[in-house]
Image (cartoon, rainbow, N blue to C red):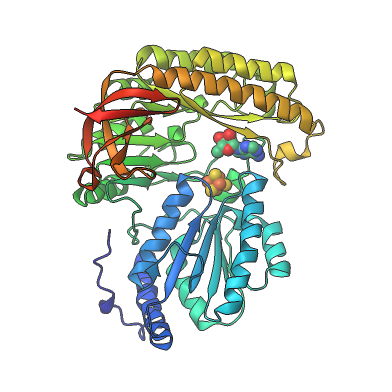
Amino acid sequence: MFQNIDLEKYDVTGQVPVEETEKQYYYMAKARGHVQNLAAELGRRPTCCVTTFGCQMNARDSEKLVGILELVGYEITEDENADFVIYNTCTVRDNANQKVYGRLGVLQNYKKKNPHMKIALCGCMMQEPSVIEKIKKSYRFVDLIFGTHNIFKFAELLCGLFENEGMLIDIWEDTDKIVEDLPVERKFPFKSGINIMFGCNNFCSYCIVPYVRGRERSRNPKDIIREIEKLVADGVVEIMLLGQNVNSYGKNLEEPMSFAQLLQEIEKIEGLQRIRFMTSHPKDLSDELIQVMKNSKKICKHLHLPVQAGSTKILTGMNRRYTKEQYLELALKIRREIPDIAITTDIIVGFPGETLEDVQETIDVIEKVQYDNAFTFIYSKRTGTPAAAMENQVPEEIVKEGFDKVLKCVQETARKQVSKYEGMVMDALVEEINEHDSSLVTGRLSNNTIVHFPGDASLIGKIVDVKLEECHGFYYMGHRV
Ligand code: 5AD
Ligand code: SF4
């Protein structure tokens, strides 16, 4: 997308444009010159590897980085032994941070052998001042650090990397800026994520996201629709609308609009076949949205509705702003209104003060909602969040015991839910050749379940009818009909 942009029209010896999008294209033109010089020096095209940690938001951000890198002349590779390596980091749990530190050690060894190699770090983890201090002190070989709020100026930073010596650090605390129309290179030709909003205002007491992704900002609906129309014209059939809390979309726009209204506008786009979205906060999920989902031909039969915990006492400590009863009422209403919908969730075990009796309440919710799938996490203390300062942190053994119980329970409900469709014919979007058996392809049902069936590469990106023959726990084996 936007890849056919003509960078030649920018005079890099002239004045830097003032308008932000134009300004960034100017820097892309300039960066292209630097990459050409490097290519001449190396006698080959320089390579670049972007490694993504974390969620779909980060995956989408990485596609934006790759869009610019390709446009300025890098050859994109998955091999981290490259001329330029970028880690787009996550910090939602501490193990995400530890992974980055561990892998930086490996990169340092590559860099010792390749003096041209540059290393950049970006994403959520970089918004934490303590991380920056640590990198400045112990990881001096990193060349560029930027954050989540200024990713749009990546081309400008890239020029800075070529034009300056030493570590370049540019972190913004927050922003109200949304820069449109920058290049982006999709990982899949037939499906794409689309940011509809950035940031989060919820401040769940365990969560670092509002601190690293800033305040809620919704994109203008016209920009969203225009982007989707362009994607559809470019072969996309399925989109995933992305936001930390999509249900509060549009509240702060000049002309306020609800998420349900946005969905109805998107539904009208001809050629678009499937609409997904993520993530929904239960406190903001409206009846209007349930009705729009129920009546839609394009919105997929899947709702990710993070519960986090079952006990109202813990939910209050988490600042989730709903009770166990309110959550159950909502989830069961959705099951009633849209019987064939898959409901998935996120669960945290071991939040400060959580006892095994509290965990039992989580299990009660799982049994009542009968989740189709759930991501279960052990609570991770994030410095700077209110929960980190709470006194009653839970001992590891208790957390482990609760976690195992929760996991067992969600596996049981998921198995039961997924197998409900055995013998039926459903439509699947073919995503890839099966990893283990090249005579099979892997498709995704509207309810997000995976099905493997005989087929070849010509089916990739097509929606086909598949008979779900055998359920193997979390996926199906089937045949095209
Ligand atoms: N510890 C463990 N899990 C967390 N999540 C967010 N913050 C934490 C934390 N501090 C989980 C929540 C959220 C998902 C993206 O990550 O379940 O929904
Ligand atoms: Fe995504 Fe949150 Fe991780 Fe950032 S910290 S990458 S927003 S999960």
Q: Residue furthest right?
A: 391
Location of residue 28 by image quarter: bottom left
Residue in the foreground of this view, choosing between 96 and 183? 96
- Quadrant housing residue 410: top right
Left or right: 351, with 362 as reference point: right
What is the total number of numbered labels drawn onto the structure image?
A: 0
- Quadrant in which the C terminus appears: top left
Is 149 above or below relative to 108? above
Q: Position of residue 374 (x, y in %)?
A: 52, 28
Residue at position x 44%, y 69% from top?
48
- Residue at the spot x=70%, y=30% of the render? 351
Residue drawn at the location 42% of the way across and 72% of the way down: 47
Task: Say whether residue 195 is visible.
Answer: yes
**In this rendering, does residue 394 appear at all?**
no
Task: Please state which of residues 18 and 422 is positioned toward the viewer in this rendering.
Answer: 422
Image position of 95 with respect to 412: above or below: below
**In the displayed structure, does residue 287 sit left or right of residue 305?**
left
State which quadrant residue 350 falls in: top right
Residue 51, position in %: x, y?
Answer: 50, 58
The relative height of residue 477 versus residue 104 in the rendered view (above or below) is above
State the image coordinates of residue 86 (x, y, percent, origin top left): 51, 64
Residue 259 x/y as whole percent: 37, 33
Q: What quarter of the picture does the N terminus occupy?
A: bottom left
Q: Nearer the viewer, residue 344 or 146?
A: 344
- When the figure is inspected, residue 405 is found, relative to residue 451, above or below; the finding is above
